[in-house]
Image (cartoon, helix red, strand yellow):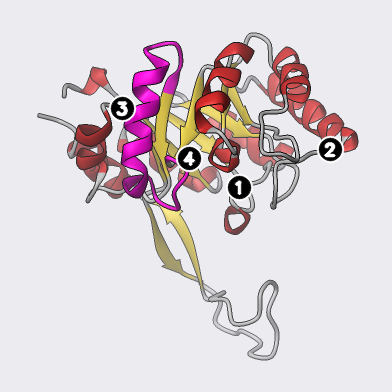
Amino acid sequence: MKREEFMVEVCANGVESCLAAQQGGADRVELCAGIPEGGTTPSYGEIKVARRVLTTTRLHVIIRPRGGDFLYTDLEVERMAADIAACRELGVDGVVFGCLRSDGSIDIEKNRYLMECAAGMSVTCHRAFDRAADPSQALEDIIGLGFDRILTSGQQPKAIDGVELLARLNRQAAGRIILMAGSGVTEKNIRALHEATGLHEFHFSAREPRPSAMQYVNPNLYMGRPGANEASLDYTTPRRVADTIAQLLD
């Protein structure tokens, strides 16, 4: 493919990763906090600084008030609407969200309300779609709601394992919505994903560990899960972004 024939979005876990994504040639970033939880809404300050530093790469922000499932209370949806309003105030290009009912169907009412809050912004339905009970019906519901794209792994832990469903959904969508493959997408499999599915948008993190600069660490204390590696941090690197993009070029 030629570069203009595909779009890449980097899952950025902070401003540093946003900058690396831009340097590596990404079209978009999805800015997230809480990566171990699958991504949660970043802070106002994180979004504000990311908006300032991203001059050629578009900024999308995940709107997800917590980890876990996608069955949201009215109070949670109220917070999501407030976060969308903050993103609009800060000049964000797009937002990313998705709500399900308890039976695994798309929550039409809550998603429609949030779509109204996000009017005029680009909107992606995130991997809540991968928890939907009937992906074909979910696809039609999301199209009907007016989302611009769906981020999906084909309802598998990794997109490369979901290529059969991704290809089928792409045929069903027939150009009515963009399907973007995400989860486990790397420079080693992005070309195979494209060839197996026909998709032209891809979502990946391209992160590498960076050792902490701390010289002293209390060995008896963890800030998060006991046993977790807190001696390094993971950041997107320009090299890995560029290498992943290069795999799609003829």
State left or right for residue 19 relative to residue 140.
left
- Cβ atoms at labels 4 and 2 below 8 Å apart: no
Which image quarter: residue 26? top left
Task: Reply above or below: 115 against 9.
Answer: above
Viewer-closest of 245 and 57? 245
Residue 18 image label = 4
Label 1 Cα neighbours within 10 Å, binned few <14 / some 14-19 / many ≥20: many
Marks 4 and 2, the one that precedes in the sequence: 4
User: SS class of the residue under badge 3?
Assistant: loop
Can you identify the residue that label 2 sits on?
Answer: 76
Residue 175 is inside the magenta segment: yes
The amino acid at mark 2 is Glu
Residue 192 is inside the magenta segment: no
Q: Gap between marks 2 and 1, in whole Å?
A: 16 Å
Which of the two discs, 4 and 2, sits closer to the camera?
Answer: 2
Q: Which residues are magenta?
A: 154-178
Looking at the rendered image, the quarter that the C terminus falls into is: top left
Residue at the farthest left position? 250
Marks 2 and 1, the one that precedes in the sequence: 1
Image x and y of residue 234, in percent = 47, 60
State left or right for residue 59 relative to residue 117.
left
Total marks placed: 4
Residue under the point 78% across and 32% down = 80
Can you identify the residue that label 3 sits on?
Answer: 199
State left or right for residue 125 relative to residue 222.
left
Looking at the rendered image, the quarter that the N terminus falls into is: top left
- Cβ atoms at labels 2 and 1 below 8 Å apart: no
Image x and y of residue 2, in percent = 17, 21
Can you identify the residue that label 1 sits on?
Answer: 39
Marks 1 and 4, the one that precedes in the sequence: 4
User: SS class of the residue under badge 4?
Assistant: helix
Image x and y of residue 241, in percent = 31, 43
